Image (cartoon, rainbow, N blue to C red):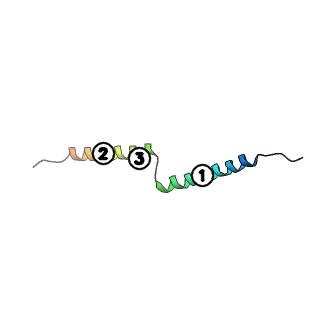
Amino acid sequence: MAKLINLRTARKQRARAAARDAADVSSAKHGEAKSAKTLRRDEAARVAKLHDQHKRER
C-alpha cells in the first residue's frame, strides 16, 4: 500500500521551499548581512578618522 500524505501539508512545504529560494536570491541580489554592513561602515569611519588626524592645519 502506498504511503499516505496530507496534500495541504505537502503544498505548504513546497510553498515554503519556494519562498526560501526566492529569499536567498533576493538577499544575494540586494546586499550583505547587517553585521557585514556595520563592520564595513566602522572600518571606513576608522580610516577617515586616521586620515584626518594626519592633516596639517594652515
Which dot, 2 or 1, sits closer to the camera?
1
- Residue 6 spot, x, y in % from top left: 76, 46
The Cα atoms of the two marked residues, 2 and 3, are separated by 12 Å
Dot 2 and dot 3 residues touching (CB under 8 Å): no
The Cα atoms of the two marked residues, 1 and 3, are separated by 24 Å
The disc labelled 1 sits on which kind of residue?
Ala
Crowding near pointer 1: few (<14 within 10 Å), some, many (20+)?
A: few
Q: Which residue is mark 1?
A: 19
The Cα atoms of the two marked residues, 2 and 1, are separated by 37 Å
- Residue 23 spot, x, y in % from top left: 55, 52
Q: Is residue 24 left or right of residue 34?
A: right
Q: Is residue 45 left or right of residue 8?
A: left
Q: Residue at x 12, y 47 (%)?
A: 57
The disc labelled 2 sits on which kind of residue?
Ala
* Figure check: 4 above or below 30: above
Which dot, 1 or 3, sits closer to the camera?
1
Crowding near pointer 2: few (<14 within 10 Å), some, many (20+)?
A: few
The disc labelled 3 sits on which kind of residue?
Lys
- Residue 31 spot, x, y in % from top left: 46, 53
